[in-house]
Image (cartoon, helix red, strand yellow):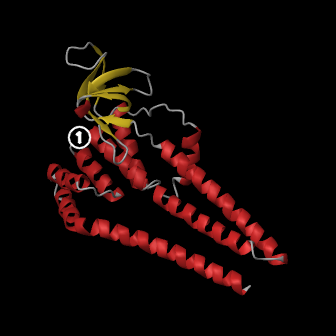
Amino acid sequence: MKRVTTITTLVILVLAMLLMAGQTSQAKTTAPATATMAVANQLYQTGQYSQAAQAYQQLVDQGYADSALFYNLGRAYDQQGERGQALVNYLRAEQLAPGDAAIAASLAQVRGDVTGGEAPVTTPDLSTRVAGLTQPWLSFNQLALLALGFWIVFCLLMIVLSNSRGALRRSLTYGATVAGLAVVLSLVGLSSRALAVPHDQAVIVADEVAATDSPGSQSVSEFTLADGAEVTVVETRGRWVEIAVPQTGQQGWVPAEMVETVSLGSSL
């Protein structure tokens, strides 16, 4: 029993250190941006939406990634009628803060404005449905930390189990089985979350763009898309991007500057 108590205490200390390390890292990341964020918020509150967007974008360009930052940037673009840029940043905010009611409401509003009130018809695949089970409760990083914690518990229980006998061994076997199952479920959740946000997801960020049959200014126009249309990136060739419209299956080429990818850290 003394050995089990010692192991339990060690596990708690390790998890506490991991949580503290994550919080410290987040504080170091966001502290230098506090003043700029405050200025941007003040600009937004006084109706200077263009200047507020520039200030928020400055933080994004410097590598800061925070749900409040992307949400505020989305609102600043939204107030200016730039639906595409608003949608991109709301989607990025959702990646960092899944289940946030304000972000979900803003996303629904912009999508309604883009589609004229009609929700896009999509059929979620298996990975998306699995991801939805944890998305309202845990962010990707929180789920990763939880998986790591379960893995540490599993490893420690297996170490103690190898040197135990009798009733204690049976109890530890049960505990290790539960911890191992928790690790597997956490990893399944992580993989499904990674697949649920495709790296090729993108949004049209121009008032109107004509998709052509091939890259180049002399190509024939196939169809047009409006600001805020959600697409996927098929191929990038120089300064041209081939996009596909999930709802209609249409494909065409558009200038790269008219498309913004949603996935954090990706660019065209």
The residue most toward the right is: 166
- As displayed, is residue 233 above or below residue 51? above
* Location of mark 1 (residue): 81
Q: Residue at x 50, y 76 (%)?
A: 16
Q: Amino acid at mark 1?
A: Gly
Q: Nearer the viewer, residue 231 or 25?
A: 25
The residue most toward the front is: 163
Q: How far from the left and from the top, in percent, is residue 199?
A: 41, 40
Is 64 left, or right, of 177 in this rendering? left
Q: Residue at x 73, y 63 (%)?
A: 177
Is 15 left, or right, of 119 in this rendering? right
Q: Residue at x 33, y 43 (%)?
A: 266
Q: How far from the left and from the top, in percent, is residue 8?
A: 64, 79
Quadrant location of the C terminus in the rendered image: top left
Say if residue 116 shows up in the picture.
Answer: no
Quadrant location of the N terminus in the rendered image: bottom right
Q: Secondary structure under badge 1? A: loop
- As displayed, is residue 176 above or below residue 229? below
Q: How far from the left and from the top, in percent, is residue 29?
A: 30, 65
- As displayed, is residue 120 above or below residue 68? above
Q: Nearer the viewer, residue 252 or 67?
A: 252
How many marks on residues?
A: 1
Mark 1, other Cα within 10 Å: few <14 / some 14–19 / many ≥20? some
- As displayed, is residue 161 above or below residue 86? below
Say if residue 160 shows up in the picture.
Answer: yes
Q: How far from the left and from the top, in percent, is residue 6?
A: 64, 84
Is 11 left, or right, of 232 in this rendering? right
Q: Residue at x 30, y 22 (%)?
A: 253
Residue 222 in which image quadrant: top left
